[in-house]
Image: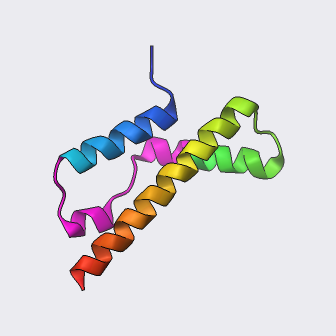
Amino acid sequence: MALPPQQLLFDEILNFLASAPSQQEIVAFRPSDNLQARASELLDKNRSGDLSSEERIELDEFQRMNHFITMLKAKAREKLT
């Protein structure tokens, strides 16, 4: 059984962090194209009011992970200056 996209995003972030990335690599980190496309799809559905309750949960998790990555990148940028 395939993992849901939000679990794939979490796993992608964990694998990235487990690789002991440099500050520059953290700042440059981007989720895979597939996960970015899924997030865009969910945002489009949300804007049009077509988001199911399951998709709302998925979008919320994507947003939590995005916030985490944004904060991580901010800390990495601080250390680079």
SS majority, magenta: helix
Judge whether 5 appears above or below 26 on screen.
above
User: Viewer-proximal residue, 48 or 8?
Assistant: 8
18 left or right of 73? left
Number of numbered labels in the structure image: 0
Residue 5 in the magenta stretch? The answer is no
The image position of residue 45, as x and y in percent, is 74, 44
Assign the C terminus to one quadrant of the image. bottom left
Judge whether 80 appears above or below 45 on screen.
below
Q: How is the image coloured?
A: rainbow
Residue projecting furthest to the top: 1
28 left or right of 6? left
User: What residue is rendered at 47% in x and 43% in y?
Assistant: 35
Judge whether 31 appears above or below 57 on screen.
below
The image position of residue 10, as x and y in percent, is 41, 40
Residue 29 in the magenta stretch? The answer is yes
User: What residue is rendered at 45% in x and 24% in y?
Assistant: 3
The image position of residue 48, as x and y in percent, is 82, 48
Q: Say which quarter of the image contains residue 68.
A: bottom left
Per the rendered image, the range of residues in magenta is 19-38
User: What residue is rendered at 67% in x and 50% in y?
Assistant: 43
User: What residue is rendered at 54% in x and 46% in y?
Assistant: 62
The image position of residue 24, as x and y in percent, is 22, 69
User: Viewer-proximal residue, 30 or 16?
Assistant: 16
Residue projecting furthest to the bottom: 81
Assign the N terminus to one quadrant of the image. top left
Residue projecting furthest to the right: 49
Q: Say which quarter of the image contains residue 79.
A: bottom left
